[in-house]
Image (cartoon, rainbow, N blue to C red):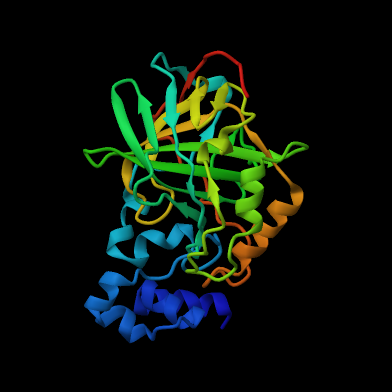
Amino acid sequence: MSDFNRRELLLKGMGVAAAAAATYGLREPAGTLLHDSAHAATTPPPWNHDPSALIGPSRWTGIDPGFSTCGTGVHQSPVNIETAQVGVFRGPALQLKYDASELAIGNTGHVIEVKVPPGAEDVMQIGGDTYRLTQYHFHTPSEHTINGRHADVEGHFVHTNAAGETAVVGVRYRIGPRPNRLLETILRMAPETSGAEGRPIGEANPADLFRGLDGTRAKRGQVQVNRFYTYDGSLTTPGCTENVHWYMTYGSGHVSRAAVKHFHAVVAKFANYRGYANDNRPVQPLNGRVVQLRVGPKRHS
């Protein structure tokens, strides 16, 4: 019997979470994972981004009841943006007002993440809606594709408002001659141990990650995003919660080849990734959604 067939029998007889525990040699025994409800409430079951794995994206929906939307949702993210098929967004520009704050780079075991410390006044405004930045994190390669093509890195700036709604601003970075200095620092200094919070290494302003983007002005902590793609989708990691407002900048930034190589090496060491070096979810069907483009001034800084 092949290893693949053994794994399929495990899935049918034990359920995805238990089979994953048996196959991947997880830290907790399968019995703890399945029967200790108090422990399960605080420790999510393992998952990864490897499409061929038992705990990869196509299996997320069966790993845990809280992940069911990953398979049943019809407005999922990321998506492929076909530039010849976008609609027109006639709403206002995005306004981001970010403070310099303590930079502590974390490794969640799924992404490289920077949490916004308490007291930081990092705000996103679009029209009359105000959201606050809670964290920003990075995937490699990009999760969203443009005309079927990935960038090398994608940053997600996650905001929430007083009503509990989520808005994510996405920025794609490709290998190029003018690497973003703050991005270089974050990727090169990311801890290699899953779950590591990382020690503060000084102050930084997330607005600097928007420098040099076509259709975006970034200066002294204030960012005006004039040109962007927008649609409603979901979080791109389990539980894939929907009703997320997405704003993908039209322009892309630059990153160095060395930083991207290091990022992939860190991902390969994520717990339960077993050497798989990418942390992007595959693109999801639009299911009738139309991505819109706001066409504004092309000025950038």
> In percent of the image, x 50 and y 65: which residue is there?
109
Please give the name of the residue rendered at 36% of the width and 59% of the height, measured from the top-left corner: 61
Residue 75 at least partly seen: no
Q: Which residue is drawn at 40% across and 60% down?
A: 60
**Above or below for 291 versus 237:** above
* Closest to the observer, 139 or 50: 139
Q: Examine the image and state in which quarter residue 172 appears.
A: top right
Instruction: Using residue 50 as the reference point, say whether residue 245 is left or right of it.
Output: left
On the rendered structure, is 263 left or right of 175? left
Where is residue 232 drawn, in percent x and y? 37, 33
**In this view of the protein, which residue sits in the foreground, 3 or 170?**
170
Check the image and report above or below for 247 versus 189: above
Q: Where is residue 213 in the image (x, y as percent from the top left)?
A: 61, 28
On the image, which quarter does residue 238 sit in?
A: bottom left
> Residue sitting at 72 percent across and 56 percent down?
261
- Residue 268, given in percent of the width and then of the height, sits at 62, 66
Residue 259 appears in the picture as rendered: yes
**The C terminus appears in which quarter of the rendering?**
top right
Count all numbered tags in the image, as a single digit: 0
Residue 149, image x, y percentages: 64, 38
Pick the residue in front: 130 or 37: 130
Quarter of the rendering occupied by the N terminus: bottom right
Outermost residue to the front: 202
| Above or below 141: residue 11 | below
